[in-house]
Image (tube, rainbow, N blue to C red):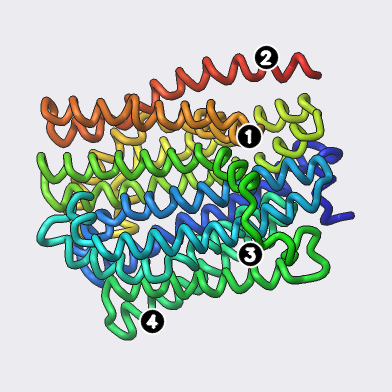
Amino acid sequence: MANSPHTLGSDSIRSLLLRYAIPSIIGMTAMSLYNLMDSIFIGYGVGDKALAGLAVTFPFMNLAAAFGALVGVGAGAVVSVKLGQRDLRTAELALGNVVLLNVTIGSVFTIVSLLFLDGILTFFGASEVSLPYAREYMQVILLGNIVTHVYMGLNDVTRASGYPQRAMAATLTAVVINAGFNSLFIFGLGMGIRGAALGTICAQSVALAFLLVHYTRPQTYLRFRLHAFRYSLKMVRSIIGIGCSPFFINLCACMVVTLINQGLMRYGNDHYVGAYGINNRILFIFIMIVMGLNQGMQPIVGYNYGAGQMRRVVRAYKATVICATAVMTVCFVLCEFFPHLVIAMVTDNDTYRDIGSRGLRIMAAMTPLVGFQVVTVSLFQSIGKAHKAIFMSLSRQLLLLVPLLLTLPPHYGTDGVWISLPVSDFLSVVLATVLVTGQIRKLRKEY
């Protein structure tokens, strides 16, 4: 029973969080470095104009991630709760529907995106200079989109079903292979930005093969079953209902990054867009660490909520908030006091470093508070309160940040774009405090 998910209801919260969160943190940090790695290889191996092209693809990547999270995160939560209820057959059905949904959604997304690629990239903020680079990168990424979706979806379920080390191993495999392929394709074969995209898809293909082997092994507690590979309307509704929150988070992120790129192009130039792209990937490292903590918390909270052990739910949430706040405080210190050194990891261009340093200091102003808000959204996702998680996600991005991005830049130029981010962070933390206080009170009544 060492690998049984039922230990989620009996082992100490501290040991479970360490056991589940550390592999998730390593995996998510590796994933963020995986993204940063593209910037580093492109910055030093292709050129500064290519960095602006890469930044323009961020909204596209957010949009693709939205559909991936819709299935993967939703299925992970369903699997955790069903295993907590000892309903293995339904958990297996969720696993089968993860594959089917990701193949279907990934195929449609690829076809539609390739048909309207230039128009979409231009809307996302591409200029005549950055468009060719963005097009080359996204053409390859989109052709491998099905692989990406299935890999991400299965990785979410692997983590939620009691195998966080396997999920971590899959991610680390992708990171290491991506580094090797990037070196080969960009520096060895001179394939430019297209080589970075090809390296990403090749790496994810290997990681997907690793997960497919895992789910066909007889020793795996939750594995592929023939009966599960059929669409179940009830299951699809459950997955999408819970997955709507991260879907809207990424969808709003797509809208937000588009507005940021457009604002920086309108009041600045390609260098501002490229600088934002660098800053975004740097901050993304710390956000992904917090997401790793969330992924460690999610199966603990989901299982114990399904088993009616509310005291353990609250304890897991509080421990995760403390860890997330510590992580984002480190982010604050690095970005406020050493921004030039941080940006120098990606590029040696003085213009990027000067513009990016000012923007990074402003963007990171409220980061010590951000961890609490992100973990609170994950709590609501994990206990099936999708409507509250969606409301929080929409409020931070759509109701708070979008109006700021529309009103501040006309008065303050590029500084208005930067300032919008910490202001919305602070307001979203206030909202999270109000909502989670009521939810914790309800959980305590069931002790």
**Residue 441 - label:** 2
Secondary structure found at label 2? helix
Residue 25 relative to residue 147: left or right? right
Earlier along the polypeptide chain: callout 4 or callout 2? 4
The residues tagged by marks 3 and 4 sit, at their Cα atoms, a distance apart of 23 Å
Q: Does residue 82 lie above or below 191 as drawn?
A: above
Amino acid beneath label 1: Thr
The residue depicted at 54 percent of the width and 57 percent of the height is: 101
Q: Is residue 172 left or right of residue 316?
A: left
* 67 or 208: nearer the viewer: 67
Disc tally is 4
Q: CA distance from mark 3 to mark 2?
A: 38 Å
Q: What amino acid is found at the position of numbered circle 2 in the picture?
A: Arg
- Residue under pointer 1: 320
Q: Residue at x 27, y 82 (%)?
A: 190
Q: Quadrant of the C terminus?
A: top right
Closer to us: 160 or 360 = 160
The label number, if any, that marks residue 169 in the structure image:
3
In which image quadrant can residue 27 be found? Answer: bottom right
Identify which residue is drawn at 56% across, 29% down: 376
Single out the mark in the foreground, 4 or 2: 2
Mark 4 to mark 2 CA distance (whole Å)? 55 Å
**Of the residues shown, which amino acid type is indicated by label 3?**
Ala
State yes or no: discs 3 and 4 in contact (Cβ < 8 Å).
Answer: no
Q: Position of residue 265 (x, y in %)?
A: 13, 46
**Image mark for residue 184:** 4
Measuring from the top left, give residue 248's x and y in whole percent.
Answer: 43, 39
Q: Is residue 419 above or below residue 283?
A: above
- Can you see residue 252? yes
Tell me the distance, in whole angstroms, between the alpha carbons under discs 1 and 4: 40 Å
